[in-house]
Amino acid sequence: MDVKQRVRWLINSLTHKKAMQFVDRYELLALWQCGIVALPEILAKIEELSKLKESLRLHSEKDEAIGRVNMGLTNLLEVLSGYEDPRVEPILEQFAQAGHPKAEELLRRHRQGLRGIVTFDW
């Protein structure tokens, strides 16, 4: 599997979870470790999920569907926050201002210069 295929597979996996388990954090790490090659795909998927979330909200869809989109957005925002790129902070600011649950923390960490993905190995 080449890097672009790996990026697509990881993004698909991370955006279709109902909930995260500790082991899933390794997928976050693997996506981040794909490097700058993953950034355009991550940005495109964040935009796609944002539009989908708005559409679901307008059509009063089930909370489960919106919850899955929120989980996908949270996962991708966390990976995004690990990059040193001028597009990262404005996107995190946008989500923080919109009240996204984890965006404010990710923005704070990014501004502090913290990069990468935290995993736990017990």
Image (cartoon, rainbow, N blue to C red):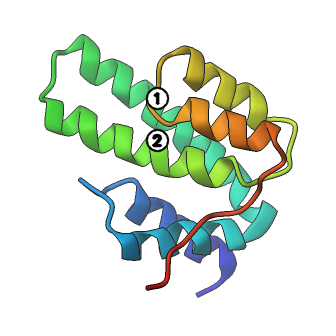
Q: Nearer the viewer, residue 55 or 78?
A: 78
Q: What residue would you read off at disc 1?
A: 50
Q: Earlier in the sequence, mark 1 or mark 2?
A: 1
**Badge number at residue 73:** 2
> Residue 9: in sight, yes or no?
no
Q: Determine contact: label 1, label 2, CB under 8 Å.
A: yes
Q: Nearer the viewer, residue 108 or 79?
A: 108
Q: Nearer the viewer, residue 122 or 88?
A: 122
Tell me how many marks there are. 2
What amino acid does circle 1 point to? Ser
What amino acid does circle 2 point to? Leu
Task: Examine the rendered structure and indicate whether residue 94 appears above or below residue 12.
Answer: above
Q: Is disc 1 surrounded by few (<14), some (14 to 19) or many (20+) residues within 10 Å?
A: some
* Quadrant assignment for the N terminus: bottom right
Question: Looking at the rendering, which quadrant does residue 118 occupy?
Answer: bottom right
Q: Looking at the image, which residue sits at the far left?
A: 62
Q: Position of residue 38 (x, y in %)?
A: 69, 61
Q: Position of residue 47 (x, y in %)?
A: 55, 33
* Quadrant assignment for the C terminus: bottom left
Task: Examine the rendered structure and indicate whether residue 40 appears above or below residue 49.
Answer: below
Q: Looking at the image, which residue sits at the far top?
A: 58
